Image (cartoon, rainbow, N blue to C red):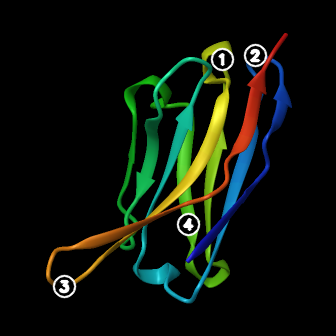
Amino acid sequence: VQLVESGGGLVQPGGSLGLSCVASGGLFQILNMAWYRQGPGKQRELVASITHGGITDTADPVKGRFTVSRDNAKNTVYLQMNSLELEDTAVYYCHAKLIFAGGSSTEYWGQGTQVTVHS
């Protein structure tokens, strides 16, 4: 599985930005997907997730502002970011997790896309 993100850029506080992540490899419909981010001098953190069944969750710092969704027909997961704040500045990474029947799993990461919130 290969993950390719797009949509990062520079935005002013209060603005919006949408990220996309296209997965290749033919397994998208059974992948649990997520977005992580790593800000300057910070550890990588989970931002939002969506299971292969469409159940979503968002981290408290972005709850109510960010929305994760997926389109299985396009092998794509999205992150819509509204009301962006300076603290949202980070490299955003697409993540995929494939869980096998026996309980083991394997993970995949995209290369990351930079989001900069700057006035």
The quarter of the rendered structure image containing the N terminus is bottom right
Distance Cα–Cα, label 2 vs label 3: 44 Å
Residue matched to label 2: 13
- Decide: few, some or many residues near mark 1? Use Cα within 10 Å; few <14, some 14-19, many ≥20: many
First in sequence, mark 1 or 2: give its number: 2
In the image, taking residue 101 as reference, residue 114 lies left or right, namely: right
Residue matched to label 3: 101
* Relative vertical location of residue 110 with respect to residue 45 in this rendering, above or below: below
Say which residue appears at 63% left-offset and 57% top-offset.
Answer: 78
> How many numbered circles does the render carry?
4
Tag 4–tag 1 contact (CB < 8 Å): no
- Decide: few, some or many residues near mark 2? Use Cα within 10 Å; few <14, some 14-19, many ≥20: some
- Decide: few, some or many residues near mark 4? Use Cα within 10 Å; few <14, some 14-19, many ≥20: many
* Relative vertical location of residue 57 with respect to residue 47 in this rendering, above or below: below
Q: Amino acid at mark 3?
A: Ala
Q: Amino acid at mark 2?
A: Pro
Q: Name the secondary structure under disc 3.
A: loop
Q: Amino acid at mark 1?
A: Glu
First in sequence, mark 4 or 2: give its number: 2
First in sequence, mark 1 or 3: give its number: 1
Distance Cα–Cα, label 3 vs label 4: 23 Å
* Relative vertical location of residue 115 with respect to residue 70 in this rendering, above or below: above
Residue matched to label 1: 85
Distance Cα–Cα, label 4 vs label 1: 24 Å
Residue matched to label 4: 70
Give residue 102's position: percent from left, percent from top.
14, 82
Give residue 108's position: percent from left, percent from top.
49, 65
Q: Name the secondary structure under disc 1.
A: loop
Q: Nearer the viewer, residue 84 or 92?
A: 92
